[in-house]
Image (spheres, grey):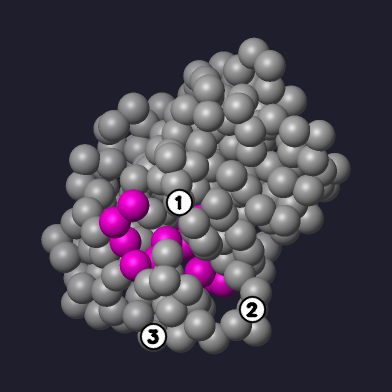
């Protein structure tokens, strides 16, 4: 079944969960891994992130779309495009908690954004038990996440749930990714905070050949690493089962 959790309340265990927070957490994570960070440590809380501070780690995150006190960076993909430390610690309002929650119950968890859409679709090509998880905003539906969910659903094989059909139909109503990413409440907050460039950055389609994957989850922190593209799916599933 190809299903979509249109808000975090619909998160459930699935064979494969694909977490989507287009504006901006999953876009920033894909960009950070492409930019050379060896892993991203996604934290449910700001305190957990601050406790991970070390010289080898950059601390990034947001509350209300702006960097929290004591953090090195915000949640902008542009800010992490060139790694200057080994690891990125990331704490965001919606995306990181959705990743941690999804990882707690699902066989494997990958992260999708428009930036890495083709790579994720290719990775899922032989899987028909998929839950696309929309991180949403403060527990509620977010249009831009449903848009990407619909774009993904359109390219996956398998029976579709009603939520998957709804997302697919919604995605078709937009003429371009930028139109979808600009016409929502989160985009309005980003514009208000002077971060409009991030909307255009996140609207770029399939420019990163990277599949961020949760490789461990413990105490509200999910470790996310880029796929070693030469590892086979059975290796990855075996690894997930062993965790
Ligand atoms: C989040 O995780 O809540 C978002 O990525 C918010 C943001 O745009 O920074």
- In front: mark 1 or mark 3? 1
Q: Name the element at disc 1.
A: strand
- In front: mark 1 or mark 2? 1
Please tell me how crowded label 3 is: few (under 14), some (14-19), or many (20+) other residues with Cα within 10 Å. Answer: few
Q: Earlier in the sequence, mark 1 or mark 2?
A: 1
Q: CA distance from mark 1 to mark 3?
A: 25 Å
Q: Residue furthest left?
A: 162
Which of the 4 quarters of the picture holds residue 89? top right
Residue at the spot 46% in from the left edge and 85% down from the top edge: 234
Which disc is residue 126 wearing? 3
Question: Looking at mark 3, is its residue's CB closer than 8 Å to ligand 1?
Answer: no
Q: Where is residue 212 shown, x and y percent of the image?
A: 57, 61
Residue at which label 2 appears: 229
Q: CA distance from mark 1 to mark 2?
A: 21 Å
Please tell me how crowded label 2 is: few (under 14), some (14-19), or many (20+) other residues with Cα within 10 Å. Answer: few
Q: Where is residue 169 shown, x and y percent of the image?
A: 26, 59
User: Is 107 contained in the magenta span?
Assistant: yes
In-image side of 212 versus 158 (left or right): right
- In front: mark 3 or mark 2? 2
Q: Mark 3 near mark 2, Cβ–Cβ under 8 Å?
A: no
Q: Name the element at disc 2.
A: loop
Q: Nearer the viewer, residue 7 or 96?
A: 96
From which residue to which does the magenta span run?
104-121
Q: Where is residue 239 shown, x and y percent of the image?
A: 47, 73
Q: CA distance from mark 3 to mark 2?
A: 16 Å
Residue at which label 1 appears: 217
Residue at the spot 64% in from the left edge and 13% down from the top edge: 69
Q: Quadrant of the C terminus?
A: bottom left
């Amino acid at each position: 079944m190809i299903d979509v959790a249109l808000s975090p309340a619909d998160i459930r265990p699935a064979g494969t969960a694909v977490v989507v927070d287009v504006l901006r957490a999953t876009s920033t994570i894909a960009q950070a891994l492409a930019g050379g960070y060896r892993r991203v440590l996604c934290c449910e809380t700001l305190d957990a992130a601050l406790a991970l501070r070390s010289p080898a780690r950059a601390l990034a995150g947001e509350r209300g779309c702006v960097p929290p006190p004591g953090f090195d960076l915000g949640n902008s993909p542009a800010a992490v495009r060139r790694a200057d430390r080994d690891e990125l610690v990331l704490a965001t309002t919606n995306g990181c908690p959705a990743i941690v929650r999804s990882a707690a119950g699902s066989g494997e968890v990958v992260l999708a954004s428009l930036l890495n859409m083709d790579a994720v679709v290719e990775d899922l090509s032989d899987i028909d038990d998929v839950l696309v998880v929309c991180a949403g905003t403060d527990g509620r539906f977010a249009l831009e996440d449903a848009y990407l969910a619909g774009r993904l659903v359109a390219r996956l094989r398998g029976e579709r749930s009603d939520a998957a059909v709804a997302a697919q139909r919604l995605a078709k109503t937009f003429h371009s990714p930028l139109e979808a990413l600009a016409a929502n409440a989160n985009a309005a907050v980003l514009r208000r905070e002077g971060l409009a460039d991030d909307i255009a950055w996140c609207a770029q389609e399939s420019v990163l050949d990277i599949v961020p994957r949760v490789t461990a989850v413990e105490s509200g922190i999910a470790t996310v690493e880029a796929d070693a593209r030469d590892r086979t799916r059975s290796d990855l599933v075996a690894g997930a089962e062993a965790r």
